[in-house]
Each structure stands twice: as structure tokens, then as C-alpha cells.
Amino acid sequence: MKIIKILIIAVALILISALMLTGCKWGDKTPPDYPDPPVESNAETFVETDAPKLEKKDGGGVAGLTYKTDVYVYISSGTASLYFANPNISVDNVLVKIYADGFRIAETGILEPGTKITTLPLNDVGIRTIKTAGDFEGKFVVEFYDSETNEKSVLNTEIPITVKVR
């Protein structure tokens, strides 16, 4: 009987230790922590319109996007030339990922309302995979972040683009 009690206590201690190591928090309803993406260092400020900010509905975000669907990639410099803007009428921040032929080749930091990006360095995957000139199917994957709390939205937007490698 004493051995059974010792085994029960040992199993209970192992379970408690495992829960503590995995970070389980009983009753914790806070959203998971994601590292805050940095603000895009290459972003340029611009004012597209003097219209008032879009109206934010309860529990939702609002961003008006301006972009061109052709992205030029220059192998020699390892850069992408694009136009993607988060107009000043937006309420939310955005982060843009560029995919070509199924690979993520570049990514912005946070674009706050009233900023745009026109040049990005390719990431390591982009530099390793893009070797030949041509036109490829691609997409922008746009992630939305609350501009006050920086909380990431559960929804993303995908925009078809053409990646023109030169």
C-alpha cells in the first residue's frame, strides 16, 4: 500500500512538472504571445488623401490598401521593387509578405497608416531560389495588426501578383 501511495505521488509530481514546463496556465484566457514585428525601416511617409479615417467597427479592423500587382525582382542586387501602401485613412497596421512560385521571398515590417514601401531586400530563401529571369505567379499575403495594441488579426488577405525577375 505504501508503494502505491509513493507511485501516485511520483506520477502527480511528474504531471505537475510537465504542466509547469509547458507553460500551461489554468483559466488563462489571454491570447498567445507573438513577437511584435518591427516597424518597416524602409517605409516612406505619404498622404494619399485628406479624407477622414475609415470607421472601425466593434471587434474588427479597417485598412485601405493601395498596391501594384507587378513586383520586379533584381537578381544582381537581391532586391524587390514594388508599390504597396497603407493609406492614412486606414486604422490598422499591415505587414506584407511576398511569395513567388510558392516561396516567401521578402517581407516588410509593420507599415503604419500613411506609409508605403517601394523597395525590399530579398530574404535568404529569395536569394537562394530566384536564379533565372522570367515572370512567375505570386501573391502578397497581408497581415493586419491593431494600431493601438499591435494584436495580430486572425484574418489575412491574399492578393495575386506577377513577380517579374530581371
Image (cartoon, rainbow, N blue to C red):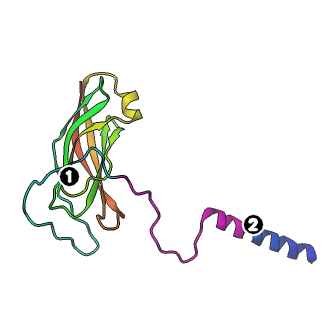
Q: Is residue 42 above or below residue 19?
A: above
In the structure shown, which secondary structural element does the residue marked by tag 2 occupy?
helix
State the residue position of label 1.
115
Residue placed at 20% from the left, 52% from the top? 115
Q: Nearer the viewer, residue 150 or 55?
A: 150
Q: Residues within 10 Å of mark 2 (few under 14, many from 20)?
A: few
Which amino acid does the dot numbered 1 rest on?
Thr
- Residues 42 and 51: in front is 42
Q: Residue at image x 22%, y 43%?
A: 160
- 92 sits left or right of 15 in the view: left
User: Where on the picture, by quarter, is residue 42?
Assistant: top left
Specify whether 131 is left or right of 29.
Answer: left
Q: Quadrant of residue 137?
A: top left
93 or 58, nearer to the observer: 93
Task: Pick the quarter of the image with the N terminus.
Answer: bottom right
Of discs 2 and 1, which sits in the foreground?
Answer: 1
Q: Residue at x 30, y 64 (%)?
A: 146
Q: Which residue is mark 2?
A: 14
**x and y percent of residue 97 in the render?**
31, 45
Q: Magenta-highlighted stretch: main secondary structure?
A: loop
Q: Residues within 10 Å of mark 1 (few under 14, many from 20)?
A: many
Magenta span includes 30: yes
Disc 1 secondary structure class? strand
**What amino acid does circle 2 point to?**
Ile
In what quadrant of the picture does the C terminus appear? Answer: top left
- State the separation of the CA atoms marked 2 and 1: 52 Å
Q: Are marks 2 and 1 in contact (CB under 8 Å)?
A: no
- Magenta stretch: give its range: 15-38
Q: Earlier in the sequence, mark 2 or mark 1?
A: 2
Q: Position of residue 25 (x, y in %)?
A: 58, 72
